[in-house]
Image (tube, grey):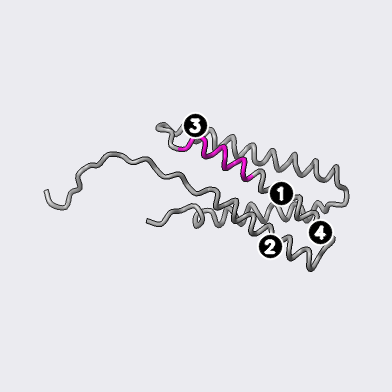
């Protein structure tokens, strides 16, 4: 029959380019560090530490998520993505508490704004950064 396609063998899905999220977060973080170093130098240390903790947590989530990618039943992918997300927020919470306890000069407000901004902007940009051209 004309117009119908023949079935082809299933091809594996390409891995999503989640590392683009880390690059995006690093670029935003470096921009924030530069701006704060010029305009508000008192808060620069807070931005540096909070950004490092955020990027480390995002890297953990990406690593856990991609470990199970391509599973035929998607069980390990979902388990990895879930445990990665929980681990990400545990790393953020523990890292920030340890930071605030060990460095009293670090601003809690600036740290929280940094974490919130980096995660929110990465989540908003994720569909654009991860998708592949067709």
The quadrant in which the C terminus is found is bottom left
Furthest toward the bottom, the residue is: 39
> Of callouts 3 and 1, which one flags the residue occurring earlier in the amino acid sequence?
1
Give the residues drawn in magenta, as a range: 58-69
Percent position of residue 18, x then y: 53, 48
Front residue (pair 11, 74): 11
Give the alpha-carbon distance from disc 4 to disc 3, as whole Å.
41 Å
Percent position of residue 1, x then y: 11, 48
Q: Secondary structure at mark 3?
A: helix
Q: For marks 3 and 1, give the one nearer the viewer.
A: 1
Give the alpha-carbon distance from disc 3 to disc 1, as whole Å.
28 Å
Kindly identify the residue that appears in the image at 69 percent across and 59 percent down: 30
Q: Secondary structure at mark 2?
A: helix
Q: Which residue is mark 3?
A: 76
Q: Which residue is mark 1?
A: 52
Q: Which residue is mark 2?
A: 31
Q: Which residue is mark 4?
A: 43
Q: Secondary structure at mark 4?
A: helix
> Of callouts 4 and 3, which one flags the residue occurring earlier in the amino acid sequence?
4
């Amino acid at each position: 029959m004309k117009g119908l396609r023949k079935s082809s063998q299933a091809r594996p899905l390409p891995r999503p380019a989640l590392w683009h999220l880390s690059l995006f977060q690093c670029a935003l973080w470096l921009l924030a560090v530069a701006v704060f170093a010029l305009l508000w130098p008192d808060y620069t240390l807070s931005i540096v530490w909070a950004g490092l903790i955020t990027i480390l947590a995002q890297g953990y989530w990406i690593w856990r998520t991609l470990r199970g990618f391509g599973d035929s039943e998607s069980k390990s992918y979902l388990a990895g993505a879930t445990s990665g997300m929980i681990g990400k927020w545990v790393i953020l919470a523990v890292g920030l508490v340890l930071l605030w306890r060990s460095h009293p000069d670090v601003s809690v407000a600036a740290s929280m704004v940094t974490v919130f901004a980096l995660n929110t902007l990465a989540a908003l940009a994720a569909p654009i950064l991860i998708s592949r051209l067709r």
